[in-house]
């Protein structure tokens, strides 16, 4: 078989489509004998024409391909001939003209002509694919072969549909009739836009108009949270000429096609509310439907949506995705489907913000560096006559920085300090050309808690043109080596604690200092070290972190239970007073890095 550049391009496109992550919907089109003008809303999976039309009595499929100059469309599609440079054509194998095919895969949100035999019975054509957020690319001062996103029951009239667009208002509109000929719509004010149908529409001048309802997520793929993204925006704009009410409704994804990531379940979402009249401010779980009443023309409804990974039921398949569809509609019949996808806490991650690949299927979904603050707002009073061991509220809270590392096995360690550095990659001879070098191990960030290892790495940031490390430390703790934390339950969902000891002769012991001879732990001749209990005492701190499902410091933040954790902080201090001192407060942690190993020297 002769391979052309076009064939190779389509093969690459199909390979890319096979690896694409998606949420699924089924579009069903009604085909009849003769010519059909259809608008495919979803990106089909698979996209191959041979697969999509297998078992259907399709004689040919046509896609308009002209990108320049005004269009002089053919009123009778029967006059179309394979090889026309303005059209891409698919003809099934077995037809003598099959060798002239130039259309090999269908694209979502594109119009097509589908030809069935004259004696074919009416039949449904179901296409499973991924909805796309893809605007129309109009060719100015010309007719355009397009379709529109409207409700299954039908959209607004053509007059209302285009009332908000000067480039289309009053322009000619052609519809394919039952005889297979294009006829001009005589009364746009009483003719409705239908789903899945394609039209020739006039455009006077440049235009970006895609309908009276515009949806924007920033990406054609919709709301794709991957493994790390927490919050994305859904922008809904009234581009009509009238006031409308808009709704966003959650819908279940259709079954997943073969070869695609499995469906782990629906993707639970939260949304940000700010209603100062009713004193509502913060994040809440998204209900089955949200509504925006009476949005004026030209105005936008912006929805901040976060994915609630902590509410996802764990999947046995780490490559499975949580998938949902959002139906965005107005009260006149315009409708878009927005795909939503996310991996769970144990799902396959994407690349880190720094560009480093995070290994798939980490044993612990919380692996990495966590940094935050503990706010101490209660302390016991040992001299209290009745409740000496009960922490009491303080006038002004104290704040302690917390630095915690969780390894790939879920083991947490409390750190006094850590430095982010860069480990250079390595190369090896190219097996295809030994004179060249290829990457053996890519460079990546490392977290260093042992300062003696710092010379082994490069800086992770540039200051005044020099590479330097980025240090995080806590003045609230005096230990030098990472402290293992005992766990009851998984990190982020149970309790972690550790016992920190500070020797009586440690330079950082609060009883010891060089400014007074009674606190240097030396005898009067400064020749011998005194035993404990004469001038100084050892201090012990029992630190406990009890994680909570809700943010203890007020309105819940996006990513709570995922990239943000927190709960109750408790500490017991002995050695400072003859009686233990009990402290309480809250803490909040933010995941600062996904590096799962400390002091990586491999």
Image (cartoon, grey):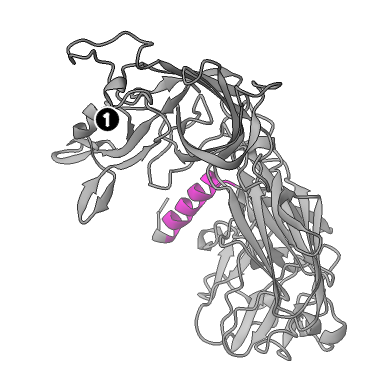
| 256 sits left or right of 423 in the view | right
Confirm whether the magenta stretch covers residue 12. yes
Q: In the rendered view, would you say 159 is above or below 124?
A: below
Q: Main secondary structure of the magenta part?
A: helix
Seen from the viewer's position, the closer of residues 179 and 161 is 161
The image quadrant of residue 303 is bottom right
Q: In the rendered view, would you say 579 is above or below 303?
A: above
Seen from the viewer's position, the closer of residues 516 and 602 is 516
* Quadrant holding the C terminus: top left
Would residue 181 be visible to someone looking at this image? no
Pointer 1 local density, CA inside 10 Å: few below 14, some 14–19, many at least 20 = few
Residue drawn at x 28%, y 16% as measured from the top left: 521
Q: Which residues are magenta?
A: 6-21
Seen from the viewer's position, the closer of residues 357 and 378 is 378
The x and y percentages for residue 212 are 73, 76
Q: Residue furthest left?
A: 435
**Label 1 SS:** loop
| 213 sits left or right of 233 in the view | right
The x and y percentages for residue 437 are 17, 40
The x and y percentages for residue 386 are 71, 21
Residue beneath label 1, please?
515
| 354 sits left or right of 310 in the view | left
The image quadrant of residue 389 is top right
Residue drawn at x 63%, y 80% as measured from the top left: 144
Residue drawn at x 53%, y 77% as measured from the top left: 66
Residue drawn at x 52%, y 31% as measured from the top left: 366
Q: Residue furthest front?
A: 524
Seen from the viewer's position, the closer of residues 20 and 597 is 597
Would residue 80 be visible to someone looking at this image? yes
The x and y percentages for residue 57 are 73, 55
């Amino acid at each position: 078989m002769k391979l052309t550049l076009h064939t190779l391009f389509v093969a690459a496109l199909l390979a890319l489509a096979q690896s694409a992550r998606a949420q699924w919907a089924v579009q069903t089109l009604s085909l009849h004998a003769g010519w059909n003008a259809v608008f495919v809303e979803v990106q089909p999976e698979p996209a191959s024409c041979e697969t999509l039309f297998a078992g259907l009595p399709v004689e040919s499929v046509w896609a308009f391909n002209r990108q320049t100059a005004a269009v002089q469309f053919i009123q009778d599609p029967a006059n179309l001939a394979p090889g026309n440079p303005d059209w891409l054509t698919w003809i099934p194998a077995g037809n003598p003209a099959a060798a002239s095919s130039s259309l090999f895969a269908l694209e979502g949100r594109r119009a097509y002509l589908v030809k069935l035999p004259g004696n074919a019975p009416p039949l449904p054509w179901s296409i499973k694919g991924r909805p796309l957020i893809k605007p129309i690319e109009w060719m100015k001062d010309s007719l355009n072969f397009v379709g529109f996103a409207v409700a299954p029951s039908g959209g607004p009239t053509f007059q209302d549909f285009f009332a908000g667009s000067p480039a289309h208002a009053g322009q000619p509109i052609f519809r394919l009739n039952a005889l297979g000929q294009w006829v001009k719509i005589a009364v746009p004010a009483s003719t409705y836009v239908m789903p899945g149908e394609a039209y020739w529409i006039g455009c006077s001048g440049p235009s970006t108009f895609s309908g009276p309802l515009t949806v924007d997520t920033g990406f054609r793929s919709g709301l794709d949270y991957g493994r790390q993204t927490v919050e994305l925006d859904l922008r809904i704009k009234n581009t009509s000429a009238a006031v409308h009410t808009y709704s966003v409704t959650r819908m279940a994804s259709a079954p997943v096609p073969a070869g695609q990531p499995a469906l782990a379940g629906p993707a639970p979402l939260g949304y940000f509310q700010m209603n100062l009249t009713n004193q509502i401010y913060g994040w809440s779980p998204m209900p089955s439907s949200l509504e925006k009443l009476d949005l004026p023309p030209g105005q936008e409804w912006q929805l901040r949506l976060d994915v609630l990974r902590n509410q996802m039921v764990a999947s046995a398949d780490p490559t499975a995705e949580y998938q949902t569809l959002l139906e965005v509609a107005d009260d006149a019949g315009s409708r878009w489907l927005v795909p939503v996808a996310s991996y769970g806490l144990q799902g396959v991650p994407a690349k880190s913000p720094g560009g480093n690949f995070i290994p798939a299927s980490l044993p612990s979904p919380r692996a990495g560096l966590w940094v935050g603050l503990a706010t101490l707002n209660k302390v016991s009073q040992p001299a209290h006559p009745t409740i000496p061991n009960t922490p009491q509220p303080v006038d002004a809270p104290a704040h302690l920085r917390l630095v915690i590392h969780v390894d790939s096995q879920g083991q947490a360690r409390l750190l006094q300090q850590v430095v982010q550095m860069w480990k250079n990659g390595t190369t090896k001879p190219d097996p295809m050309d030994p004179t060249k070098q290829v990457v053996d191990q890519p460079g990546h960030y490392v977290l260093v808690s042992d300062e003696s290892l710092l010379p082994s790495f490069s800086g992770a940031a540039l200051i005044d043109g020099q590479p330097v490390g980025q240090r995080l430390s806590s003045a609230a703790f005096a230990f030098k080596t990472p402290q293992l934390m005992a766990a009851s339950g998984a990190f982020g969902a149970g309790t972690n604690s550790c016992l920190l000891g500070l020797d009586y002769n440690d330079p950082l012991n609060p009883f010891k200092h060089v400014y007074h001879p009674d606190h240097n732990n030396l005898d009067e001749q400064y020749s011998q070290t005194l035993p404990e209990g004469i001038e100084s005492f050892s201090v012990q701190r029992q630190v406990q972190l009890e994680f909570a499902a809700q943010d203890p410091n007020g309105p819940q933040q996006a990513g709570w239970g995922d990239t943000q954790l927190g709960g109750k902080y408790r500490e017991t201090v002995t050695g400072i007073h003859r009686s233990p001192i009990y402290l309480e407060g809250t803490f909040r942690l933010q995941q600062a890095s996904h590096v799962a190993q400390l002091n990586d020297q491999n």
